[in-house]
Image: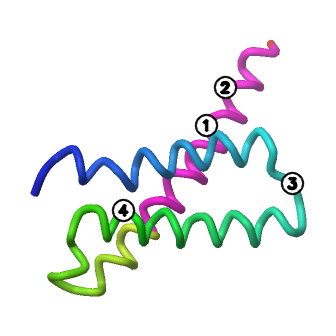
Amino acid sequence: MNLLIEIFPFAFGVLLGLTWSRFGGPGEWRARWGIACVALGAFATFASGEWRESPIYFLFDIGLVAAMSVGTVFALARWRRWRER
């Protein structure tokens, strides 16, 4: 597989995490975040062509997008607390 295409779920997750940490909030934003994870993960699967091999790749890419976005949000929160000191 092309390495550049395999980076899509990670990059989408980081970008989603940056957006979520900037504009996110309680309530309806969680639903929007979930929809964005599914959409971006599915797009990454289609872009890489992995869906031809097995539909399970949808779950992997959606999970990667979600994990990277949550990790980015936590890392930014920690960095902001460290910066305020």
As for residue 70 lying within the magenta part, the answer is yes
Between discs 1 and 3, the one toward the N terminus: 3
Is 71 left, or right, of 44 in this rendering? right
Q: Is residue 65 above or below residue 10?
A: below
Between discs 4 and 1, the one toward the N terminus: 4
Residue 23 locus on image (x, y percent): 81, 44
Q: Which stretch did the figure color magenta?
A: 63-84
1 vs 3, front mark:
3
- Quadrant of residue 33 within the rendered picture: bottom right
Q: Which three-letter amino acid code belongs to the residue tagged 3?
A: Gly
- The circle on residue 6 is none
Which quadrant does the C terminus fall into? Answer: top right
- The circle on residue 75 is 1
Mark 4 sits on what residue?
44
Between discs 2 and 4, the one toward the N terminus: 4
Q: Which residue is at 29% across, 86% downward?
A: 55
Q: Which residue is at 71% across, 48% downward?
A: 20
- Mark 1–mark 2 CB contact (< 8 Å): yes
Q: Which three-letter amino acid code belongs to the residue tagged 4?
A: Ala
Mark 3 sits on what residue?
25
Q: Secondary structure at mark 3?
A: loop
Is 72 left, or right, of 11 in this rendering? right
Is 17 left, or right, of 39 in this rendering? right
Which quadrant does the N terminus fall into? Answer: bottom left
Query: How many neighbours does mark 2 have within 10 angstroms: few (below 14), some (14-19), or many (20 or more)?
Result: few
Q: Is residue 8 above or below residue 77?
A: below
Residue 83 locus on image (x, y percent): 73, 15
